[in-house]
Each structure stands twice: as structure tokens, then as C-alpha cells.
Image (spheres, coloured by chain):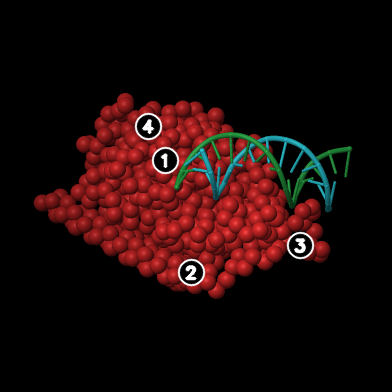
Chain colours: A red, B cyan, C green
Amino acid sequence: MQGLGGSAVLSLTSESRGLRTSLENPEAECSQVTFTKLRSDKGVRERGNGVNECWGLPGLSLWASVLSNSNGKVLAWNLQDCDGERDRLLDEKHAVDLIESPLQAGGLDDLASSFSLCESCQLGRMGPVVMPPGKKVVDPSSGSLARALTPLYQDTEADDLSLSLSASLSRAQDEELTSLSWLHESTDLLTRMGHSGLRSVSPVQDGSAGNEPSPSPSSSPEPSFPCTGPSRKPPYSFSCLIFMAIEDAPSKRLPVKDIYGWILEHFPYFASAPTGWKNSVRHNLSLNKCFKKVDKDRSQSIGKGSLWSIDPDYRHNLIQALKKTPYQPYSPRLPKPSTSPSVSPQQYHSPPLWPGSALFGKNGGVLLQVPQRVIQHGSHVAAQGLFPVIRPLPLSPVSKRTTAVRSALGDFLSRAKHSVLIESPSNCDEQQEDHTYSSWQCPLSSSPSTCPTQDSSIPRTLSTELKLEQKDFPLDRRLGMWTKGHLQTPRDTLPLKKRRAENILVKEEEDEEEEDEEMKEAAGSLLHLAGVVRSSLSKKIIKVQKELKEEDGELEQ
DNA sequence: GATGGCCTAAACAATG
DNA sequence: ACATTGTTTAGGCCAT
């Protein structure tokens, strides 16, 4: 690996409006990696006042997004892979130096936690942040920047991190991080985020929430990023995609055309995929008993075809399927994941939480408010700093908060439970483009069963929620009729739709009870997580503040 | 090796 | 006539 020498730099300067990178000549100081500005979107955040600037690094499939509020406070930032997106959007060059660090939705806390101040480059109280000299350097040509850097942070705990917080960051932290409200803000940022190294599928989009199809994988000029690219397959099966689409619809029913549209909108991969996927969607609608055709209201003129809805009897199944989505529903040609015992795939996965779930509702929206539409992308965010474990995280332009919370909490939980270990790059390198529509594999998982429920965002309107823990018995045993293969009754010989028409009974009461149990479990776990996270944040802030005071004291002397 | 889940392709009919 | 939608069948790959 060719190092860059020295340390990489993150330079950020808070200005009156938004956050702007501002080094005049960063190379003169300690820059190692120069990012170029991709774009700046203002006023597009849900809460307004948001400024989201994106910075890309030429030669790397990476770009950085920095979200700040109107006061210039950094709410969140992250790096992501953008491949062709970068080329397409790159407009002006700035001497911005970032290091790595996929910080997901972490705001100042993560930002500060993952970088050390470069004293020589400090700009006021919020100066450049530099990687500790002892840290390894990233080689842009070596593939995933995040991957390359990740090991550097395996043991980068508070000791190293303590170097990094500037006073302004600390102040902002006080305001931004005393609650988890930062996640509200930061999730917006996730619109554009993915993770370079681990995001093997991620249909990364630009800030337009997926209105524009991502460039084809071939457009990526960096073959060294085998795991990256904006046009990777979503991690979800078609049934899950359809489910999300329908659930995302206010009326909970959609014509096929709109289902297409939804999928295209949220998973731009399909824009450039062979058209067969539409056939697959229709095939799924017809074959999967979870989907029910709704007789069209004559008064409604939706054109040809019917509306499709979720069969309430099978809705739970779909949720379970989403929950179970191992991110490799079908992954031909993907390498066998590392079986290294030191890597626990679970650490890379967040619990299947999303703000729209009843879980959140029952917890009074403790963690988040729910975005109106929560969708998911199969992209990954690597968390470092506070959540240094690089883990895949599905992202979507509209599921930001969900993603942020679940990712953050999941990261934290995972980190607490496991030592931080990083995947082998070869794992990723072996991945190849697969044009099966849904092929995706958790690059860090060793098996679907161990790479579970990293769900992703799911439409908030889902009225049931995923459980934090898997049942220890198969879904099809729980629900009996989930798969046609388990439909052992004579009905099996009937077409699925006809079978459905025969009113296969599923006791809703039982489902409700089961869901209640799940919600209770999930609620407990979530609240615990929230407490852990807050506790961690508080400790970190206190520590940094203490160190700053000490530094001030030394300066005075 | 059997089984199940999922994907893909294709053919065909129905519909607007 | 055409495009779209819906159904069905078949075959393949992968994981269990």
C-alpha cells in the first residue's frame, strides 16, 4: 500500500452560514488528501437552515458530506463513495483535506472523536483536524479509503480521540449532543452517504433523493473499489421492495407502475439494470401471496391494471422478511465471507429499528421523529470515532433518521459487545459486479444468519416492527404459511391467489400478541441503547472538556 | 443430495 | 395495434 506520508487532514472552518472548508494552502501544513467540492445544497434539509456540502477526493470514489446548521455547527458529516457521482457533480476545487472516516451521522461527536487536531493547522478554535502521526496513512489507490483506515481505529479509543476536540466542537457538542437530537439533523446528511469500502450495493444517490439514476458501475474510474459503486443491487428481495413501496404509499396501495417508480426512485440501480426487473416485480406480485390485488375503484382512473396492497395476513411475514434480510438474499458469485472467528458479523448490524415502527411510537418518539417517508438504500456507512466499527448500513435519501439512529445504536451496541475488528480487504476485493437484481452481500458477514436484520429503513408507516432479536425458530414455522413450500395443504395445488382467496386463517390476535411481545423486547433494548449512547457521549464530552481546560491551563502558564 | 428461497426469463392472456 | 399488466411455468443459483 502506498502511503501518503504524514497524516491526512480534515480542515473545517465554521463560518457564519454553514460550514466551509477553508484552508488556503492545506498542503503546506499537513494535508494529505485533497478533496474537491462537489456541491453545496442549501435549504434542503427538512429543518431548513441546513447546509450540506459535499467534498470529493479526485481519484477516489469518495466524497465527504458535511452538514451544518445555520450557525455553522457541524451536525454531521461523513464520507461516502460516489463514483461517477463525483465526476458528474464535481464543480469547483477546494483545498479541503479530509481523512477518512466514515462517520455516520454522528455530528460533532464523531467528528471530533475521529480526528486529532493538527496544531499547526488550527484555524481559530475550529481548525483542521489531523490524524495522529502515529496512524497509518491512507492510500487513495489502494481501494476503500475507509477500509484502509479502519484498522487505524481499531484501538483508537478515548486516548487518541482526546486529542481531537477543539473548543468550538466541544461547545457545539454541548448543544448538539446533549440529546440524541443530533440524529435528527444528521440523518439528512445520509441522503448522500454511503460508505466506500463496504458499501457493496449501495444505490447511492445524490441529494435529489434518487431522482437521477446513478451512473452505471462501469462509469466508475476506480477499479480499485470493487466493493463500491452507486449502481449496486439493493439488498432486498423484490418482495421487500414491493412491500416497502406499498407501505410507503399513503393509501397503502399502488399500481404496478407506481411500484416501479418507487423502486426506481429509491434504488437507482434499477434505472440502469436490465428491464427484466419489472417482470420480476410483476412476477412477485402475482406469485407472492403477501400481495393482494385490490379491485380498482371505478371512480379512480389510474389507467390499466389494479392496485396492489399488502395482505394484512401476511404483512407480518413481510416485516419478518425485511428483518431477516441478511443483505444477501441472493448473492451468486459473491465470495464466501471470511470465517475469521475474530469477526463477529453481528457487530456490523444494527437492530432492525426504524422510527416508523410501533416500537418508536410506543416509546414516545424518544429517539427520533420519523421522516415522512423512510426508505432504504443498500449502502453502507462506516462508523468511526464514536462508532469506529465499519459496518454496512443501508441508506436512503429518505430514511435518514431511521438509518442514523439504527446505525448509531447498532454500531454502539455492537462495539460494546465485540472488539473492533476489521474485515479483510480481500473479502471485498473479490466481490464482483453482479447483475442479478438483488444480489448483495454483507461484505462482513459470514453467513446470512450472522448478518441479520441490518435492516434498513422501512417505511415509517409500517405498523408493526422488527424485533431486535431473531426468533430461534424459522419464520416459516412460526407462521406456517409463509412459503409455498410449506403450504402442505391441498391448497398448495391451487394458484397462490386462489389459495389466498380461500381465506387461509391467520389469527390476527395471535400476531398482535406476538408483535406486542416483540415490541416490548425491542423497546427495552432500544431504551437501553439510548442510555448507553447518551452515557457514552456525555463521558466523552466531559473528558474532552476536561482536557481542553487542562490545555488552556497549560497555555496560560 | 434435498429442499426452500429467490431471481430471471419467457410465454401468454387480459386490459386500456 | 400497441403497450402495459397479470399469470404461469421453467430453470438456475445459493443457502441450509
Residue carrying label 1: A443
- Of callouts 1 and 2, the N-terminal one: 1
Residue carrying label 3: A295
* Local SS, label 1: loop
The numbered dot on residue A514 is 2
- Of callouts 1 and 3, the N-terminal one: 3
Q: Horizontal and vertical percent for residue A256?
A: 70, 51
> In the rendered image of this protein, does residue A57 appear above or below residue A549?
above
- Of callouts 3 and 4, the N-terminal one: 3
> As drawn, is A509 to the left or to the right of A115?
right
Residue farthest to the top?
A2
Q: Are marks 3 and 4 in contact (CB under 8 Å)?
A: no
Same-chain check, marks 1 and 2: yes
Q: Horizontal and vertical percent for residue A211?
A: 61, 46
Q: Is A348 or A19 nearer to us in this picture? A: A348
Q: Are marks 1 and 4 in contact (CB under 8 Å)?
A: no
Q: Residue at x 36, y 47 (%)?
A: A345
Q: Amino acid at mark 3?
A: Asp
Mark closer to the observer (4, 2): 2
Q: Horizontal and vertical percent for residue A171?
A: 30, 58
Chain identifier of the residue bearing label 4 in the image:
A
> In the rendered image of this protein, does residue A376 appear above or below residue A83?
below
Q: From mark 2 to mark 3, how far is it between C-alphas?
A: 31 Å
Badge 2: residue crowd in 10 Å (few <14, some 14–19, many ≥20): few
- Of callouts 4 and 2, the N-terminal one: 4
> As drawn, is A8 to the left or to the right of A194?
left
Same-chain check, marks 1 and 4: yes
Chain identifier of the residue bearing label 1 in the image:
A
Badge 4: residue crowd in 10 Å (few <14, some 14–19, many ≥20): few
Q: From mark 1 to mark 4, how far is it between C-alphas?
A: 10 Å
Q: Residue at x 36, y 60 (%)?
A: A176
Badge 1: residue crowd in 10 Å (few <14, some 14–19, many ≥20): many
